[in-house]
Image (cartoon, coloured by chain):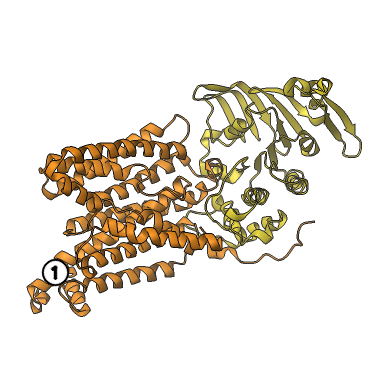
Chain colours: A yellow, B orange
Amino acid sequence: MGYVLNEICFAYDQKQVFDKLAITFKKGLFYGILGPNGCGKTTLLDLLLNYHRPNKGTLLFNGKSIDTYSRQTLSQKIALVPQDFEIRFPFLVEEIVMMGRYPHLPRFARPRMVDITKVNQVLDKTGTWQLKNRMVTELSKGEKQRVVFARALAQDTDMLLLDEATANLDIEHSLHLLELAKKGVTQSGKTVIAVFHDINLAALFCDEIVLMEKGKIFAMGQVNDVLTSENIKSVFHVDANIRYDTEIKTNHVMFKRMYENDN
Amino acid sequence: MLESPHEAQNTATKILPSIVIIISLMGGLFIGIIAVTCLGHIEITWAQVVKIIYANITFQKELLTQFDEVLTVVVWDVRLPRIITACAVGGGLAISGTIFQGLLSNPLADPYTLGVSAGAAFGASLALLLNVGFMGSYSVPLFAFLGAGATLMFVIYLSSSTSQVSSHNLILSGIIVSAILSAGISFIKYIADEQVSVIIFWLMGSFASKTWTDAILVTSILSISMLICIFYARDLNLMVLGHRTAAALGTNIRTITYILLITASMIAAVCVSVSGIIGFIGLLVPHMMRSLVGPDNRVLLPISMIAGALLLLIGDTITRAILPHEIPIGVLTALIGGPFFCYIFRKQQLERGRF
């Protein structure tokens, strides 16, 4: 169960992104994807979403080729919190979150009681309840991000893909939302695959880390095995001290200045 | 830390349209159509109008004998086809504008964004210049429609890449093609000599001497398009979240974009080929209606259609029956619609309302 990717090749028009990529995501784990800009993290999520199709190779989702699922079926199983988005029309926050229920509703159906309850629940859990009658166009970037996160949770899927979902959020809201995602993994056996830029935030929540470099998997495994000074140096080209923190029980990365000796 | 929990409240039920509002607005439109049919050079009472319409719809020609023949001809053959064409064109331009704005995620888009109007104008100008007459009075509309269709296909071809449909590419291609065609129209006007006034008049738009063929053509295209658009209205809502997220919520972006793009352009093309270029309806109506009923396309589309129909009904009545001389409807909508739009826009800016 989960994802099995084998011999995946993918290119945008001319630019090759993946060449024979192979990776497996098991069900019931919190995965973090780390890597420099342009290494193919978002493209990987796009493939997992079947938003892009690989040029070659096999992509199995829950044991079957992802192409055999209809878009509708996939949308009941996989949710996405995107990286950058702009909502140009003045939908109410509540309407945006209700869009997360569309995959479960026929085209012309009114929301059922279950849908309304679910929407109210996620509004409450994500701390967006007091925003629900506001227009989404009037919210700050961070507030919008929380609303979009709430929308993905309302979709109530087994698989949650996060594309730098906490990039615009302050630390309190970042921790709160990631905690919600983590709770889904530990308590309900859901799977989260999250692209991070903040390495320490990833270390805090992930069961496994995937370190990517130029469309290849550089390292994958337990947080403490992957987050080493050598790996950070080879992938990100920066020096860092790694310390195991006994209280938070994970490796912690402390970066060093790049050109300290020049000054 | 965050706010305290509370009981789930039943608040999301207002999202779906109240069909009652839409039906009552439709009723209002029908009453409006009958009311303005009474207006004109020859005064006709509403009772006479209703009777003449009833007699014609039910094919009871013997009922018509009680009226002066001039009266029946004025109501049934002159005013009604024109009024119904005006309503259908208004509704068509309004839903076309709504679709374009939603699809391109751009509140500035209108039915003419992809160059449909420029294509139609070029086709019509060419037909008028060459005095094409093999289809009688339908030659010009036919050429206009072909021009619009060809332009649309070329714009889509120009903007398409292998992987994605990009709204920026579509808008840019539309602008480029429109600019080329505008230059072409200018050239046609330049070499047209005596025909130039005919071309200019056609371009400004008019509903004068529309027949039942026009009315039925536009109305049937409008009905079919409306069904298609309503069917995909929920997917159009999702487009606001961005293509990636819409796909994750079960929308087949590429297919739906092309279906809606072609549907909306075809309505616009039919409208332009029947009535000439009528601006502002497609831009203004979706804006005003969005500020009234919100951006949910399942509500916005039918409401915009009715509002567009009402607006052109009023506009056409003003130029047909109220003004001493008929002025081109395209000029009238821009002259009245433009400043009105400025007023609404300014007011909304000050209130920071739903715009």
Badge 1 crowding class, 10 Å Cα cut-off, few under 14, some 14 to 19, many 20 or more, is some
Percent of width and height locating residue B184? 25, 36
Q: Mark 1 falls within which chain?
A: B
**Numbered label tally:** 1
Nearer to the camera, A211 or B104: B104
Q: Residue at x 20, y 42 (%)?
A: B125
| Res. B353 in view | no
Q: Residue B31: which quarter of the image?
A: bottom left
Residue A186 horizontal side relative to residue A148, left or right: right
> What residue lies at 76% left-to-right and 32% top-to-bottom?
A208
Task: Please name whichever residue, B195 or A193, is drawn nearer the observer in this view of the structure.
Answer: B195
Left or right of B192 on screen, residue B254: right
Q: Would residue A196 be found to the left or right of residue A203 on screen?
A: left
Q: Secondary structure at mark 1?
A: helix
Q: Is residue A167 above or below residue A259?
A: below
Residue behind mark 1: B74
Residue B168 position, x and y percent, is: 46, 38
Disc 1 marks which amino acid?
Val
Which residue is depicted at the point 48% across and 49% down? B235
Give the vertical position of A241 relative to B255 (above or below). Answer: above
Residue A143, position as x, y percentages in the image:
67, 52
Q: Nearer the viewer, residue B24 or B310?
A: B310
Q: Position of residue B85 (x, y in %)?
A: 24, 59
Residue A11 seen from this side: yes
Q: Is residue A48 above or below residue A152?
A: above
Residue B159: image quadrant is top left
